[in-house]
């Protein structure tokens, strides 16, 4: 049997942690120490992230946080807000899992949590229950020309892109001013959708990454007014459509379709091999939109171990917070902003 050892995440281990994140095929920027520290110090989640060693060699990391809420209970979550939460391993899950399970089980019992939630690990988690509300899509940029990509798109989508080209201007930026205009537009977008917005600290965290990397925002303007903005984040050889926001009154101009296509072109020029569309609820309008890009669909599974619950928690947007979607558009932003900040932190979705 291999000698598996669990070592807690610490400031002394940051460089080793980040080196592993940069090399592992399934990690993303929000698994770096930059984000681990953010969740602990800014969102005040209790950090139980750890590293897995096999025979004294680092073979894995596991971002893990204890999140407490009067509304949603106490739970251990493998990477708040992440599409991919780990554990990220360079060995088989069978080798490492007994030691991992013992470690997180001890924490779970100590704090009498309701459940453990492991978000979309690269390997299946043994003996845990599965929830499969989400999928993602990615486009292979390395094996296709832009002409090939264009021809593969749904006919309706191509028409939307052509329509947008007639009416809007496209710009690319990574300026601080434009980036924080993205946040203002995000508040308007989420209010119109009846959804809970991310808070300003979260956008600041993204800005600290964007300003030092090739990531960018791409925006559409109409009559000198910015009506649509997308955040495109690059890490390793991968690009991700991280966020899209818009003014609801201008949706008919189809600017978002044009922005995504222009972003794909730029990311290919920058040498990205993959364009990822982001976590999506099955059978939603967004899911239907992303299907039109002829991208490859793959599942995002959440794994659960229950302690105080009898069944897997459903997506909160379908259950406890569903009523908010009906009243949110009618509440002033000055009220939705602080309420949304609190709820987002506790949902960590």
Image: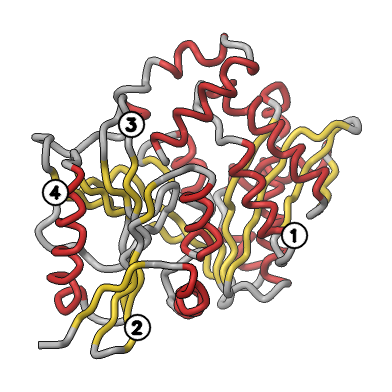
Give the vertical position of 90 relative to 186 (above or below): below
* Inter-mark Cα distance, 4 to 2: 27 Å
User: Which residue lies at the image location 46% right of the left edge and 40% below the top edge?
Assistant: 288
* Mark 1 or 4, nearer chain start: 4
In front: mark 2 or mark 1? 2
Q: Position of residue 189 (x, y in %)?
A: 62, 28
* Mark 4 or 2, nearer chain start: 2
* Mark 4 or 3, nearer chain start: 3
User: Which residue lies at the image location 14% right of the left edge and 75% below the top edge?
Assistant: 94
* Mark 2 or 1, nearer chain start: 2
Per the rendering, the mark at residue 211 is 1
Graded by Cα atoms within 10 Å as few (under 14), some (14 to 19) or many (20 or more), the crowding at tag 1 reads: some
Q: In the rendered structure, are the residues bearing label 3 and label 1 in contact, judged by CB atoms less than 8 Å apart?
A: no
Dot 2 falls on a residue whose secondary structure is strand
Q: In the rendered structure, are the residues bearing label 4 and label 2 in contact, judged by CB atoms less than 8 Å apart?
A: no
* Mark 3 or 1, nearer chain start: 3
Graded by Cα atoms within 10 Å as few (under 14), some (14 to 19) or many (20 or more), the crowding at tag 4 reads: few
Dot 4 falls on a residue whose secondary structure is helix
User: Which residue lies at the image location 59% right of the left edge and 23% below the top edge?
Assistant: 337
In front: mark 3 or mark 1? 3
Per the rendering, the mark at residue 69 is 3
* Inter-mark Cα distance, 2 to 1: 30 Å
Image-based side of 272 in relation to 37, left or right: right
């Amino acid at each position: 049997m291999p000698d598996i050892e669990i070592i807690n995440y610490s400031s002394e281990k940051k460089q080793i942690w980040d080196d592993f994140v940069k090399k592992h095929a399934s990690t993303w920027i929000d698994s770096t120490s930059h984000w681990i520290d953010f969740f602990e110090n800014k969102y005040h989640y209790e950090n139980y992230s750890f590293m897995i060693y096999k025979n004294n060699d680092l073979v894995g990391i596991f971002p893990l946080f204890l999140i407490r809420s009067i509304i949603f209970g106490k739970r251990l979550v493998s990477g708040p807000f992440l599409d991919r939460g780990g554990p990220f391993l360079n060995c088989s899950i069978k080798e490492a899992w007994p030691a991992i399970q013992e470690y997180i089980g001890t924490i779970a019992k100590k704090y009498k949590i309701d459940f453990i939630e492991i978000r979309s690990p690269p390997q299946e988690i043994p003996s845990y229950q599965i929830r499969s509300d989400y999928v993602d899509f990615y486009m292979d940029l390395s094996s296709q020309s832009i002409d090939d990509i264009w021809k593969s798109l749904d006919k309706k989508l191509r028409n939307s892109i052509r329509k947008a080209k007639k009416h809007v201007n496209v710009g690319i930026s990574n300026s601080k001013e434009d980036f924080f205009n993205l946040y203002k537009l995000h508040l308007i977008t989420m209010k119109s959708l009846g959804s809970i917005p991310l808070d300003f600290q979260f956008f600041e965290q993204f800005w600290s990454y964007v300003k030092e990397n090739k990531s960018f925002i791409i925006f559409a303007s109409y009559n000198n007014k910015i009506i649509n903005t997308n955040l495109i984040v690059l890490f390793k050889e991968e690009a991700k459509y991280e966020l899209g926001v818009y003014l609801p009154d201008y949706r008919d101009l189809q600017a978002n379709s044009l922005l995504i296509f222009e972003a794909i072109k730029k990311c290919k020029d920058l040498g990205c091999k993959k364009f990822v569309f982001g976590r999506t609820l099955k059978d939603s309008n967004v899911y239907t939109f992303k299907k039109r890009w002829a991208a490859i669909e793959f599942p995002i599974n959440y794994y659960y171990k229950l302690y105080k619950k009898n069944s897997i928690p459903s997506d909160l947007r379908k259950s406890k917070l569903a009523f908010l979607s009906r009243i949110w558009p009618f509440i002033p932003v000055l009220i939705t902003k602080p309420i949304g900040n609190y709820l987002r932190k506790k949902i960590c979705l």
